[in-house]
Image (cartoon, helix red, strand yellow):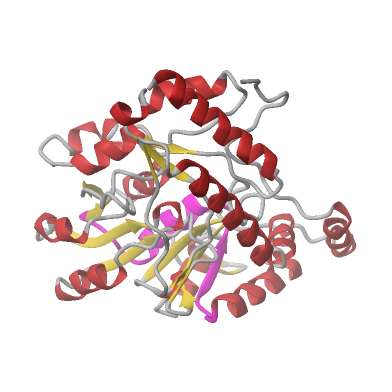
Amino acid sequence: MEKFDQPIFVTKPFLPPFEKFCEGLREIWDNQWLTNNGPVLRRYREELKTYFATDNICLFTNGTLALQIALQGMGISGEVITTPFTFVATTHALYWNKIRPVFCDIEPETFTLDPKKVEALITPWTTAILAVHVFGRPCKLDALADIAHRHKLTLIYDAAHAFGVQVNGKSIGHYGDLSMFSFHATKLYHSIEGGMLTFKDSKLNQIFSYLKNFGFKSETEVVMPGTNAKMNEMQALMGSVLLKYLNTLIEKKKNIYTIYKERLSAIPGISFSPDPAANLEYNYAYVPVLIEKTAFGMSRDELYEQLKKYNVFTRRYFYPLLTDFACYQSLALSILLDTAKTVAEQVLTLPTYADLAEQDIHKICDIIEWIHNKFC
């Protein structure tokens, strides 16, 4: 089995035609306005309001600061129930707000927070639930909303992976009290770097605007201790241009996912999440699989290393669990996270990006099948 001549990475950023971006650059050059709520950003914000069908949108320089400011602006404190199976930024945002994360186990099929295990973790100090739509798969929205309502908790979603996802005909950003989206360059949809909050309470818009701009209310008045988390004109331009390609990107990603699933599902030891439900418009942003060592013939880590020999660079995403990092180990000593631990030890995300050729997808599958046949 021959290796690829050039590395196949787990992802690559999608870039629009160079000329399209340059058209927008001319406007920025003519305006000589690079940041501080410029005209390109204002137009981009209106485009997103239309796309999400809400006026309650606030843009940021990245998703991490967006989430930190969300927690600050909503007055979240004490304890927050969250997942250990996510990117570190989710929990770091809690830490930076002096909030204690309480880790709850996940569901084995969607890798999202398990509502059946959330309620037992609620204490008098619990103020919110911070759940993550992992790989764009929605959490159990109704179940979590019911728990939050009965216990008077704020329900926050980390929707970093979920841009373009719709449930029951409306954006995933309409669920819960607030959702954070990441526009990082490696996401399905990006603005180079960037982040966004959508929220139910319209009064939060002004608070978030203060907090992301040093707390300034006017040229001479600072009303709260904010920071600098503003999106700039270059980011807004990229986001605006790419919004026109979103549906095409999702279709390409769906095709890639379909090929992988058709080719690999029959191989013992490789499993995919169930197909999306009828009421879900999924974005197919990632291709995660679970590798079960006994049936496949080697562990996930061994397959990860073997694939490198063929110039295929996958990712163990998310691994390790947050509770395995030194800064959070002490918070999980008495909590059972069996499913999360199993998933973290078995999950492997496969290469997927807009210009990944079909023949290359099939070759990746051929390599995985050949490795299985050789070692099983």
Report how many numbered discs are placed on residues in the image: 0
Asked if residue 60 lies in the magenta stretch, the reply is: yes
Q: Specify whether residue 194 is in view.
A: no
Q: Quadrant of the C terminus?
A: top left
In which quarter of the view is residue 76 placed?
A: bottom left
Asked if residue 15 lies in the magenta stretch, the reply is: no
Q: Residue at x 61, y 20 (%)?
A: 1
**Residue 74: x %, y % from top left:** 35, 67
Q: Residue at x 13, y 41 (%)?
A: 335
The segment highlighted magenta reads 53-79
**Residue 35: x %, y % from top left:** 71, 59
The image shows residue 253, relative to residue 147, as above or below, that is above
Q: Specify whether residue 160 is in view.
A: yes
**Residue 165: x %, y % from top left:** 50, 66
Q: Residue at x 26, y 52 (%)?
A: 107
Position of residue 141 in the picture relative to residue 218 (left or right): left
Q: Nearer the viewer, residue 315 or 72?
A: 315
**Residue 211: x %, y % from top left:** 48, 62
Q: Residue at x 18, y 38 (%)?
A: 332
Q: Nearer the viewer, residue 294 or 168?
A: 294
The image shows residue 27, relative to residue 170, as above or below, that is above
Q: Nearer the viewer, residue 366 or 330?
A: 366
In which quarter of the view is residue 362 placed?
A: top right
The image shows residue 254, relative to residue 316, as above or below, that is below
